[in-house]
Amino acid sequence: MTHAALWINGARVDRRTLTGLAPVDLAVAADGGLGVAKRAGHAVDVLVGDLDSVNPVDLESFEGEVVGFPADKDFTDLELALDLAIERGATRLSVVGGGGGRLDHELSSLLVLTRHKYAGVRVEARLGPALVHVVRTTVELVGSRGEHVSLFAVAGKVMGVTTSGLRWPLRNEALDVGETRGTSNEFANTTARVQVGQGVLLVVQPQHFG
């Protein structure tokens, strides 16, 4: 499995955000994500984007590959970075950022991860204290007893949702877009499992290091 980290612009990454992040084979920065990676002490192989938010000092000292795009483009820098990582063989994608940025950017970053073109890869996001999984089949979760975890349907109703290891289990049930029934569940132990029969879930551990 080829693991790629996609660094995005935003606040400084707390070192605890990176706890449990597996070693990566490819590190891609989406524009200003170059500075986020640099401040976190992580090297970047490829810088992608229109370069409108990257710090000029960081850009000048960067020795890796730069894949530039015009400012007038139809895709966000993150989507361009995701596509590049997959083109280069990534089968696992971890988006990393400090969180707490513009709300529209935060929503865009999460929703793009659920696009059908990424269905064949394992996708997660580490945004500040939150750990987010895109689930189309099954995911094994690790947390602490009492830690919150929420399940959100995206792109239509999700069928056959089954959980184990959570305080309030779901058993072959359906979750619809906008439904709040999956919000604020809790780990009953230190591991849990979420299974999906059809559709896409965002599974969010909002305070993974809280």
Image: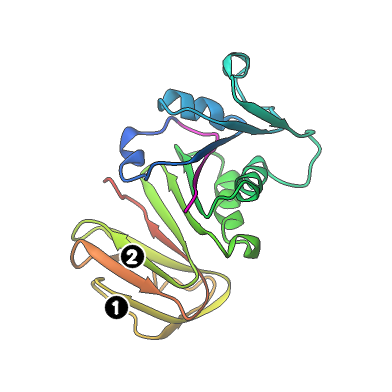
Magenta segment: does it hold 6? yes
Rate crowding at label 2 as few (under 14), some (14 to 19) or many (20 or more) other CA atoms within 10 Å: few
- Element class at badge 1: loop
On the image, the x and y values in percent for residue 123 come to 49, 56
- Please name the residue that numbered disc 2 is placed on: 140
Q: Foreground residue, 134 or 26?
A: 26
Labels 1, 2: front one:
2
Question: Residue drawn at (52%, 39%), measured in percent from left and top?
Answer: 26
- Element class at badge 2: strand
Q: In the image, which residues are magenta?
A: 1-11
The colour scheme applied to this rendered structure is: rainbow
Decide which of tag 1 and tag 2 comes sooner along the chain: 2
Question: Residue drawn at (65%, 44%), measured in percent from left and top?
Answer: 84
Question: Residue drawn at (32%, 50%), measured in percent from left and top?
Answer: 207
Up-down: is 198 above or below 100? below
Image side of residue 126 versus residue 65, left or right: left
Q: Which mark is residue 144?
A: none
Up-down: is 164 above or below 119? below
Magenta segment: does it hold 7? yes
Kind of residue indicated by mark 2:
Glu
Q: Foreground residue, 61 or 169?
A: 61
Kind of residue indicated by mark 1:
Pro
Q: Which mark is residue 169?
A: 1
On the image, the x and y values in percent for residue 61 come to 58, 14
**Residue 46 sits in which quadrant?**
top right
